[in-house]
Image (cartoon, helix red, strand yellow):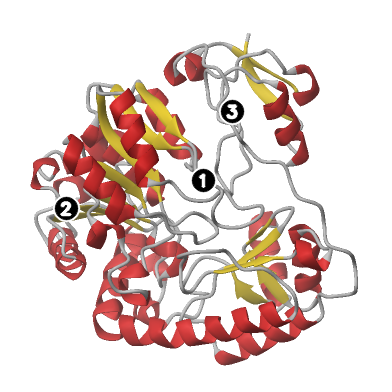
């Protein structure tokens, strides 16, 4: 058989034996998925015995009902197309004919693209920089209130929490504002599927969200691409499957669907205990990092996310990540000031010992790094996201982009705060920030 470059690359990486401090949550060893055995035998299609995802009335329907009962929702749908499919679905449900929504600027590009396709106009709300140096910060209820008052035609509010760094916004306060204005609250909870078990009461559904999307594979024992769409308001339940079918593949992956169901069963039996144990291990790593001079986010954040500010050590996050790899630890992400690690209950104790040893090797007496640039204002708007995204475009160097109109969301992802969104003018501040993130080109309208 001829060579397989992708398989060969995966096997080479696995042979390095690095500690997987990154998604997916199963870490390749999760016991709930052992029952799946040879995945090829489960890789089937929608036939009478196996049900149909978007017209579920048999075993898939029962599996989704059990997930709904676990999370306390009116309805829960399975997605084999990741959280991106769930984001598209909830926007379609809340704004089916297009229109305006109030949206936090800490947003995934999948949401920006979905808005463009659905002809949704965002009224942006910037996060307040209250989580620490170099972090995007939180969306505040007062700013959502101001945006809704300034945009009385807004049909919904859309926020992302936790963000990639694990920072949590005040969903309870934002949901109260939404109820007062009679609009639904949509929450991209891609990184928080585990919060119900790691921090009871912290899941957006428990704090008043109308619809959430949970990317289960990020932190739970689910195959990559597995996600849940949780609906708390009955008004959206009936149309949800057809809304998802509008964007989703008609050939969903059964192994992914099975992994979602097995994860639900595991959460029922072991979830709270497993995440209680993980929280203690993460707390120990955080204390160790603080003792070495690193920074942690301020305020409320995910109790099992490890986000370490390395700038006080004189190291960029990228430099710290490379050193961790040399010490046998593979992080999830690194930027100019932070390194992000995503442990799960399936990292054994020795993984955390190796991580602490690797962190101990980071300090080398360098002076702290200077503060980084950040988005402080919104660019001027020249066209709607739909007009810009679908218009003829061209890719040009960032150095030549000032004054042009962006034809795509351009942002370092993570953290996912668009420096410019489709239809916005690229100004000098935006070009400078994009360049600082290593983004050299951008698509603009011709």
Residue 2 in sight in this render:
no
Residue extending furthest toward the top? 446
Q: Residue at x 30, y 58 (%)?
A: 204
Compared to 246, does 138 lie above or below? Answer: below
- Quadrant holding the C terminus: top right
Lateral position of residue 180 relative to residue 380, left or right: left
x%, y% of residue 72?
Answer: 16, 64
x%, y% of residue 237?
Answer: 12, 45
Viewer-nearest residue: 311 or 95: 311
Please report whichever mark, 2 or 3, sits nearer to the chain's N-terminal start: 2
Judging by the rendered image, the residue that carries numbered circle 1 is 128
Q: Residue at x 40, y 46 (%)?
A: 140
Please report whichever mark, 2 or 1, sits nearer to the chain's N-terminal start: 1
Viewer-nearest residue: 58 or 159: 159
The label shown at residue 420 is 3
Q: Residue at x 39, y 31 (%)?
A: 114
The label shown at residue 373 is none
Q: Residues within 10 Å of mark 3 (few under 14, many from 20)?
A: many
Viewer-nearest residue: 411 or 226: 411
Judging by the rendered image, the residue that carries numbered circle 2 is 232
Q: Which mark lies nearer to you, 2 or 1?
A: 1
Please report whichever mark, 3 or 1, sits nearer to the chain's N-terminal start: 1
Q: Which mark lies nearer to you, 3 or 1?
A: 1
Tags 2 and 3 touching, CB below 8 Å: no
How far apart marks 2 and 1 lie (CA) works out to 28 Å
Question: What kind of element bears circle 2?
Answer: loop
Lateral position of residue 428 relative to residue 260, left or right: right
């Amino acid at each position: 058989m001829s060579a397989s470059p992708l398989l060969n690359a995966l096997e080479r990486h696995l042979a390095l034996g690095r500690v997987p401090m990154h998604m997916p949550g199963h870490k390749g060893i999760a016991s709930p998925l052992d029952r799946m055995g040879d995945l090829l035998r489960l890789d089937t299609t929608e036939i009478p015995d196996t049900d149909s995802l978007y017209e579920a009335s048999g075993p898939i329907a029962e599996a989704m009902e059990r997930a709904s009962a676990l999370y306390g929702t009116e309805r829960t749908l399975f997605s084999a197309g990741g959280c991106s499919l769930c984001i598209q679905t909830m926007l379609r449900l809340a704004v089916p004919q297009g229109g305006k929504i109030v949206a936090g600027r800490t947003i995934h590009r999948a949401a920006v693209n979905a808005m463009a396709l659905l002809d949704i106009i965002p009224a942006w709300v910037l996060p307040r920089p209250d989580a620490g140096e170099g972090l995007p910060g939180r969306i505040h209820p007062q700013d959502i209130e101001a945006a809704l008052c300034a945009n009385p035609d807004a049909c919904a509010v859309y926020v992302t929490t936790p963000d990639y760094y694990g920072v949590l916004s005040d969903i309870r306060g934002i949901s109260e504002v939404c109820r007062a204005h009679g609009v639904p609250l949509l929450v991209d909870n891609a990184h928080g599927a585990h919060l119900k078990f790691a921090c009871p009461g912290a899941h957006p559904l428990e704090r008043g969200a109308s619809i959430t999307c949970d990317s289960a594979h990020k932190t739970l024992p689910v195959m990559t691409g597995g996600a849940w769409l949780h609906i708390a308001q009955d008004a959206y339940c009936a149309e949800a499957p057809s809304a998802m079918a509008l964007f989703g593949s008609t050939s969903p992956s059964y192994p992914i669907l099975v992994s979602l169901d097995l994860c639900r069963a595991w959460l029922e039996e072991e979830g709270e205990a497993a995440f209680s144990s993980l929280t203690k291990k993460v707390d120990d790593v955080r204390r160790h990092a603080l003792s070495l001079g690193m920074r942690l986010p301020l305020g409320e954040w995910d109790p099992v996310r490890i986000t370490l500010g390395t700038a006080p050590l004189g190291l960029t996050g990228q430099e710290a990540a490379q050193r961790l790899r040399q010490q046998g630890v593979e992080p999830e992400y690194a930027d100019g000031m932070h390194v992000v690690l995503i442990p799960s209950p399936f990292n054994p104790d020795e993984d955390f010992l190796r991580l602490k040893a690797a962190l101990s090797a980071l300090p080398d007496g360098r002076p702290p790094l200077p503060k980084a640039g950040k988005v402080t204002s919104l660019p001027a708007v020249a066209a709607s996201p739909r007009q810009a995204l679908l218009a003829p475009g061209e890719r040009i160097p960032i150095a030549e982009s000032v004054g042009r109109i962006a034809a795509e969301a351009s942002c370092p992802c993570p953290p996912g705060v668009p420096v410019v969104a489709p239809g916005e003018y690229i100004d000098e501040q935006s070009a400078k920030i994009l360049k600082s993130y290593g983004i050299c080109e951008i698509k603009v309208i011709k």
